[in-house]
Amino acid sequence: MIPNTATLLQLAYGRFAVGAFSINSIEQILGAFRGAAMAAAPLIIQISRRARQYAGPGVLEAAVHAAARLFPEILFALHLDHGDEQSCYDAIESAFYSSVMIDASQRSFEENIATTRRVVERAHARGLSVEAELGRLSGKEDDIAVDQSMAFLTDADQAAEFVERSGCDALAVAVGTGHGLHKFAGTGQLHLERLIQIQQRLPGFPLVLHGASSIPSEEIARINAAGGAVAPDAQGFPETMYLLAAQRGVAKINIDTDGRLIWARVMREHLRDHPAEIDLREPGRVFVAEYAQRVAHLCQCFGCAGRLAEVRRQLGWG
Ligand SMILES: [Zn+2]
């Protein structure tokens, strides 16, 4: 594990983005490592505050570090996703993590700065980096649901002031994407011009794209053909746009929904096709392989595939 995620993001900056994959189970952990190995890509594994509550503090984290020993060549960072102040402090003290995200984007500008500043001080003292968020994405992230009409884009001038005053190391920006199955439900499209404005005000500073799963229509069709009722009008982030975003300063791209879709498809097809089976390891094995394929494919799209040796060298890992 690298101790500080921002170091990795600075190496990626302007050239490629590192995939940050949300995990909730050992199958996702194994699939993420296997996918990164297939793509020869650096990896960010992220655990949300809610995933941490689901598994129990330290359970997923220990599994990540155990799985990492099966993939000794893989360079990875472990990140707390959408933390509140207390879960950030817990993660910082646990010594499992490379970075935390403090999400105070629902609060006022001044409160967001003050909260982020407090987390930055604690994190930096322990060698971790901090991602913060400014602006508001549409959709649902664990327990936070944001109505489409409440979503708004990140202001470029405010972003520059926020980074300066909060001391954060990476900033999640709202440029049109949303959490969940409808990536452009809030403001209707990806606002590339806004991303460019933010980059111009924050040259060299790593930006983060949340709500950026690709939502393959084939996955939705297969889920629904196997008895599902997942939004047939779901819309993902166009795969051809990932590299464009990376060139505009996006150094970290978060992927959660794509993993959920693969889980739903694999489970539904397995239970449909094997009605007498009760062994969870059979669909589990299929999921690990399919998720690994998706992770590897996304790493290609992000431009981080094949970068492992280069990044290891740059970090002095030989
Ligand atoms: Zn998010």
Image: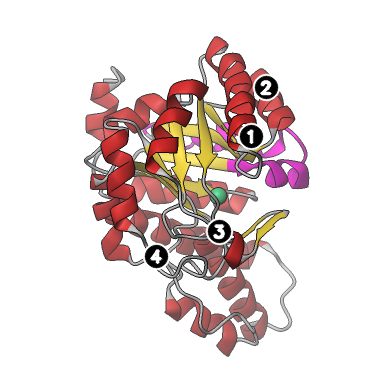
**Mark 1 — residue?**
61
**Mark 3 — residue?**
151
In percent of width and height, residue 139 lies at 60, 62
Mark 4 residue element: loop
For the residues labelled 3 and 4, the Cα–Cα distance comes to 17 Å
**Residue found 56% across the figure and 13% down from its top:** 126
For the residues labelled 1 and 2, the Cα–Cα distance comes to 9 Å
**Which mark is on residue 94?**
2
Is the residue marked by circle 4 packed among few (<14), some (14-19), or many (20+) residues within 10 Å?
Answer: many
Residue closest to the eye, 22 or 10: 10
**Front: mark 4 or 1:** 4
Q: Is residue 200 located in the magenta-colored stretch of the structure?
A: no
| Mark 3 or mark 2: whose residue is earlier in sequence | 2
**Residue found 44% across the figure and 37% down from its top:** 158
**Front: mark 3 or 2:** 3
Give the residues drawn in magenta, as a range: 47-73
User: Are dots 1 and 2 in contact, CB under 8 Å?
Assistant: yes
For the residues labelled 4 and 1, the Cα–Cα distance comes to 29 Å
**Mark 4 — residue?**
237
For the residues labelled 3 and 1, the Cα–Cα distance comes to 32 Å
On screen, residue 260 versus residue 85, left or right, reads: left
Amino acid on which disc 4 is placed: Phe
